[in-house]
Image: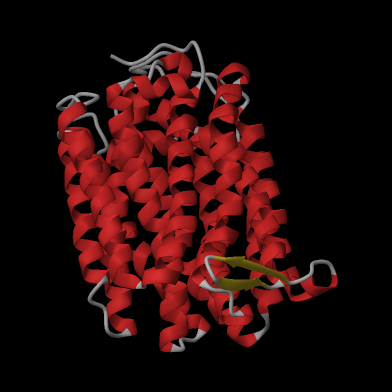
Amino acid sequence: MATGSSGGSLRLFRDREFLALASTAFARAQAYSTILIALALYADLFDTTGTVEGLFGTAFAVVQLVIVLPMGRWIDLNNSKRFLLIGLLLNIVVFVGFSLVQTVEHVIFMRVVQGIGASILWITGSAVVGEISPDDSRGLWLGTYNQVGAFSSLAGDVFGGLLLYLYGFQLTYAVLIAVTTFATAMVYLNLRDNPGGQADPDEATGVETLRNLLDRTAVRALVIFRLAFSVGKMAVIIFLPIYARTEFGINPFAIGGILAGGKLTKSLLQGKVGDVTDRYGTYRYFIFLGALIYGVGTGLIPLAEYAHRVFPAVTLAAAGSTMTLPPAFFSLFLAYAVLGVGDSFRLPASMAVFVEEGEYFDAVAGSMSLRSIAWKIGQVSGPVAVGFIWDRTSVFGAFWTAAGFIILSSLVFLVLYRSEGAPEHALSATPGD
């Protein structure tokens, strides 16, 4: 049974089903962040251009753009537990494939396969958490679920970066396989069969349902917001580790430390912010503020070029070896920490709106797939476009273009968003603002 609304994030881990779902978020996020650091190493190894580096992100997203809408329908109409197990097993195949890559083309192909597995886990996991959580603590459940992903991504940054630094690709991928195998066992043993139930095929996630969702003002505003926001954010996710490696020669372990700045703030704040959104319900203001903060953090990234004017180089010594952190390390760490604060405000509120709107039409996974496809359009175009801009201008042109997309998206969202009551034939209780 789902846990009630009293208490904080930690009490959710006494719920065996939440723990199983959290393990999928842990496995997915750790793999994602570790492979992002590996991509920086592949870019350095194969001496790629900015445009090719953009393909590392586009390849991951383009397949998701194709599959997310039909996937949402399959999930709503079938047993979600089976989809989680399939996604986890596919991720294991991905790690085996990455351990065998020999060329940049191999890397791009494996990113395509990784995109399929990540989509299955993200859409299914988020939908199941939203459906089995109590109505009065959905923000807490979704926020804590994201918080686990953020903490895991932090672990991927630190320990994944350390493993890549000390042992290279093979052992790192073996550890990811072990973590994913554990999550597979947790889901198989602890999650109920068919969590959330199966929707009526005539009602869920068909073309008519998607039209009904898009008729909702809040959904339209969020879809348009995510189209523009994703262009900027995905450029940051792909290019910040590559920038740190190729421009400043920062090693994989230190790159993980940079990314840990954002993951630390997300892992500390998301559950608490999700709880606050449950109490106040003003979702649009949390989304708007989070997007603005993220845009500011993105604009700070290229200022690492001038970090030597503020920060000294620091040399660390341990176990008979030394590592020097250049001034850019500290500048990029702070910028990424700001990005984490922005996501902590935005994500729980955004997910809560999509879950509640989907419940009106018995199509939560369909609503989450609509949320995902809005992201994928920008995710496909953003990295290549920003990489092209970087090749022809500078790092400032690239990241400030990304920041511009993010800030513009937040302003458009605030203008377009309007709260409205439940539709006439709503299948669930009326949500908050």
Quadrant containing the N terminus in the rendered view: top left
Left or right of residue 141: residue 320: right
| Residue 66 left/right relative to 268 | left
Residue 104: image quadrant is: bottom left
Quadrant of res 426: top left
Tell me the residue at 37%/71% (across/down). Answer: 167
* Quadrant (top left/top right/bottom left/bottom right) for the C terminus: top right
Q: Position of residue 228 (x, y in %)?
A: 56, 56
- 262 and 399: which is toward the camera: 262
Can you name the residue that lies furthest to the right here?
309
In percent of width and height, residue 160 lies at: 42, 60
Left/right placement of residue 52 relative to residue 259 reads left
Residue 305, compared with residue 212, is above or below; it is: below
Between 402 and 86, the one lying in front of the other is 86
Depth check: 258 or 294 in front?
Answer: 258
Observer able to see residue 199? no
Count of numbered circles in the view: 0
The x, y position of residue 60, in whole percent, is 35, 65
